[in-house]
Amino acid sequence: MAGGLRVERRSIDPVPDSERHGSPRSLFTLWFASNMQITAAVTGALPVLVGLHPLWALVAIAVGNALGGVPMALHAAQGPKLGIPQMIQSRAQFGVHGAVLPLVLVVLMYLGYFASGNVLGGQALSAITGLPVDLSIVVYAALSALIAIVGYRLIHRFGWLASLVSVVVFVYLTARLVTTHDLGAVLAGAEFEVPEFLLALSLIASWQLTFGPYVADTSRYLPASTSVRATFWWTYGGTALGATWAMSFGAMAYAVAGQQFKGREVAYVVGLGGEALVLPLLLAIALGKLTINVLNIYGGYMTVATTMTAFARRVVLSPATRVGYIALVGVLGGVLAVLGRGDFLSNFVLFLHFLLYFLTPWSAVNLVDFYFLRREDYDLEAMYDPDGAYGRWCVPALVAYFAGIAVQIPFSHVEGVFTGFAVPLLGGADIAWLLGLAVPGAIYWAAMRNRTGAAERVAG
């Protein structure tokens, strides 16, 4: 195809300087659109669902996105500097084979988010077309896969369009929510409860933290001269603003509607607009959800490819192989969506907890390595060679990673599933994710501070 619709050739291989293009400003619209959508609104309902007063839920949403957006946007700066997908870069910390361990969890993350996106997008498509919900989910997954096949340029252009639509839709829906309900009464009598606030904070922060494996994938075509500061702020502004707005809307919608919202998220949002706007709002919801759905399948296929090629020493994938990986992720995500669309909101809470505990330590190790140890100085060829500078396994990184998981267990709280022994001592508060950032980062830095460098060989 010509121009912006030319099918992307790159997959897990480095992007050469001759193919670099664009401005970091495109990251704002892409990540704004990725957050200003129905799943973010559903996530915003979670603080109220876990028992937090609506007023403090709004505070938790703002603070959680502000905190969680920092490491997320720091990952974004790795894209222009290295020109490779995020999870390939993990081989520099964990080793070419060792990186497979966190990669498997990232694959589960992509599949989970892609499946949840198909559920909500499929609901909207079903309401528009009259098709059965399960069939609509399959069609929505296929459309997401098609855009991912075309690739990077179309994804960014689609993000710009979706951002524009999202602003118009959420301005209108927010106005309708405010003018048709007495939000003053809902926000009155707020009592601050520390455990519920910290639990809500962890749920919201996890939304941003789990974008870590995505974000360099969407910035790796930017010119290598793009500054870390510009990449960080354009990404951070889009993700924090978009998520805070959409989640605040969701929190208020759940606070005033309760069971009318839970399990019927799409129908409730559309109902706010009145009968005359049902079709336009359904189209807007389907379009807005499609942005992040495409990013899920786009990042998912590269993560699967990174995992599969770790033992094959492959750098470049053929176009047919690239399409095959995208189709694989699309099929798996579509099947999961059809099978798991029953109690969506409750399942999504468990899913966010799972991701937070297992991906936060990876993020800590990755960021400490990039910003404090190797300081952007990497041997790209060695990331594809098990016999290269980074070796097959990096024991200190793996120890730090598993220590980061283990240290969270006593402080973890997943309602109805597991409660660590330290949680009651803290009044029910969940601070596990903070330890999941601090502990593995400190262990990795201490173990590797004298062993890193452009020419080092990490022995496993």
Image: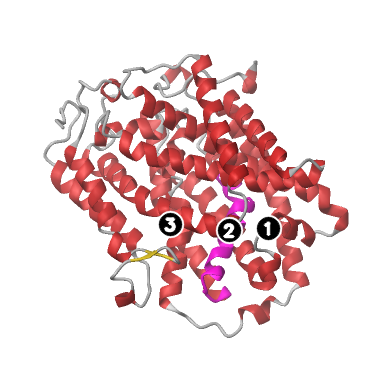
Mark 1 nearby-residue class (10 Å; few <14, some 14–19, many ≥20):
many
Residue type for callout 3: His
Is 203 drawn above or below residue 77 in the view shown?
A: below
Which mark is on residue 265? Answer: 1
The answer to which of 290 and 416 lies nearer the viewer is 416
Q: Secondary structure at mark 3?
A: helix
Residues in magenta, as a range: 28-54
What residue does disc 2 label? 345
Determine if residue 283 is in view. Answer: no
Residue at 26% x, 46% y: name it.
401
223 left or right of 249 in image: left
Q: Quadrant of the N terminus?
A: top right
358 inside magenta stretch: no
Q: Position of residue 410 (x, y in %)?
A: 28, 64
Q: Secondary structure at mark 2?
A: helix
What predominant SS class does the magenta segment belong to?
helix
Of tags 1 and 2, the one toward the viewer is: 2
What residue does disc 3 label? 353
Is 174 drawn above or below residue 306 in the view shown?
A: below
Distance from disc 1 to disc 2, alpha carbons, whole Å, reads 9 Å
